[in-house]
Image (cartoon, rainbow, N blue to C red):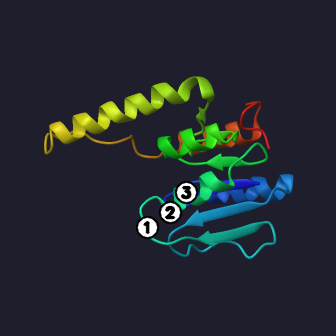
Amino acid sequence: MILVDADACPVKDEIYRTAYRHKQPVRLVANQYLRHPDHPLISMQMVSDGFDAADDAIAEAAGPGTLVITADILLAERCIAAGAPVLSPKGAAFTVNSIGTQVATRAIMADLRAGIEGQGIGGPAPFSKADRSQFLNALEGPCANCRL
């Protein structure tokens, strides 16, 4: 199964196409209804709008038989701890070896943004065609942690 942190996921169409090809079920998890294909492999789980409700639902369902798609580093950490491979929408695999550094970097960047409010420090770069291509390669390719 593919679990998708779906609220702001820019690669849902790519996930659907790959799921159809590999006959893998997909569960979108979000705190609001999202349009999705009417297909037996695709399901939608709506959660409350409580803080981290979608993350909690995904982390609870994650495990060795699931692939999680999320850009949320803290959710990725929880899913990795549950034994699930995790892939970002930009195609980067979150791994046991890299997640600690990524969590620490996230904390440092959050502190920097809070400390210099209004100074123009931004978030991640905008999503690009290259990111979409890299995601598809990671989803389909030889990435051992991300293989369906």
Q: Earlier in the sequence, mark 3 or mark 1?
A: 1
Residue at image x 49%, y 46%? Answer: 72
Q: Is residue 34 above or below residue 134?
A: below
Q: Is residue 91 left or right of residue 113?
A: right
Q: Are marks 3 and 1 in contact (CB under 8 Å)?
A: no
Indicate left or right for 138 with 47 as reference: right
Position of the C terminus, as image quadrant, is top right
Instruction: Inspect the image, locate mark 1, and give the three-letter code of the amino acid beneath it.
Output: Gly
Q: Residue at x 55, y 57 (%)?
A: 56
Classify residue 63 as left or right of residue 125: right
Give the structural element (helix, strand or loop) at label 3: helix
- Residue 53's tag is 2
Coordinates of residue 12 in the picture (x, y in percent): 62, 58
Above or below, 1 against 74 in this view is below
Q: Quadrant of residue 131?
A: top right
Which x, y percent locates residue 136? 68, 43
The residue tagged 1 is 50
Residue appearing at x 25%, y 36% in the figure: 111
The residue singled out by tag 3 in the image is 56
Q: Would you call the spot at circle 3 few (<14 residues within 10 Å), some (14-19), or many (20 or more)?
A: some
Q: Which mark is residue 137?
A: none
C-alpha separation, residue under disc 1 versus residue under disc 2: 5 Å
Compute the Cα span from label 3 to label 1. Answer: 10 Å
